[in-house]
Amino acid sequence: MKIGLFFGSFNPIHMGHLIIGNTMVETTDLDEVWFVVSPQNPFKKNQSLLHEFDRMDMVTAAIHDNPKFRASDIEFNLPKPSYTIDTLTHLSDKYPQHTFVLIIGEDNLPQFTNWKNYEQILEHFLLYVYPRPNAEDSVLKNHPRIKMVNAPLIEISATYIRNLIKQEKSIRYLVSDKVEELILSRKYYN
């Protein structure tokens, strides 16, 4: 199978993530999309990051009814911070029957050359890139291992959602009903 790996903090997972995942699995040659919950992104500070198991619960709840989606906690047991090349190598060793493709937002493309062993990633894996609002142009855009995927421009941010929760405002339609239930019942981000 050809698996798209969608890495993220998913703090929380929102409708934008689900729309991108669905677009990838429905409009490209991907058989499944795995939502890889990252315990710690080396480029992000750890502020207001829910525990990885809580974020995994939200991802599992959000995708429960889509057989083409899977939640992955593969990075929970890898050294931290999590580097994409290490996770890709680990997954390729663990699942040699699958082909893995990295899904990233266009806003990450200009910084991609700062990623650990980015040349190795491009040598061994394809990148499927979805559009992001106000993304800077990148020299990598025309790289033969990079495919630009036509997808909706989504401007929902997890920060915006967390701020609404802190202000005790509704997050309906920004996250799935199951994720909203989890956030409210467990009092996340309060």
Image (cartoon, rainbow, N blue to C red):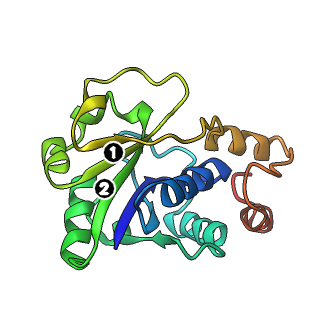
Q: From this viewpoint, is residue 13 visible?
A: no
Structural crowding at the residue carrying mark 2, measured as other residues with C-alpha within 10 Å and reported as few (<14), some (14–19) or many (≥20): some
Rendered residue at 38%/69% (across/down): 76
Q: CA distance from mark 2 to mark 1?
A: 7 Å
Q: Position of residue 59 (x, y in %)?
A: 58, 66
Q: Tell me where residue 5 appears, x and y as whole percent.
A: 39, 59
Asked if marks 2 and 1 touch (Cβ < 8 Å), the reply is: yes
Task: Please state if 143 lies on the left or on the right of 181 as rendered.
Answer: left
Q: Give the x, y percent position of residue 40.
A: 40, 53
For the point 65% across and 71% down, which residue is it? Answer: 61
Q: Secondary structure at mark 2?
A: loop
Indicate whether 31 appears above or below 21.
Answer: below
| Residue highlighted by disc 2 | 82
Numbered mark located on residue 98 in the image: none
> Looking at numbered disc 1 in the image, what kind of residue is underneath it?
Pro
Q: Residue at x 34, y 42 (%)?
A: 147
Above or below, comparing residue 123 to residue 111 in the picture: below
- The amino acid sitting under disc 2 is Ser
- Along the line of sight, the residue nearer the viewer: 98 or 161: 98
Q: Earlier in the sequence, mark 2 or mark 1?
A: 1
Q: Residue at label 1? A: 42
Whether residue 87 is visible to the viewer of this picture, yes or no, is: yes
Mark 1: few/some/many CA within 10 Å (<14, 14-19, 20+): some
Which residue shows up at 42% across the image and 34% down it? Answer: 106
Horizontal side of residue 149 vs 42, given as left or right: right
User: Please, what secondary structure does the residue beneath circle 1 have?
Assistant: loop
In depth, the one of 179 and 107 nearer the eye is 107
Report the quarter where the N terminus lies: bottom left
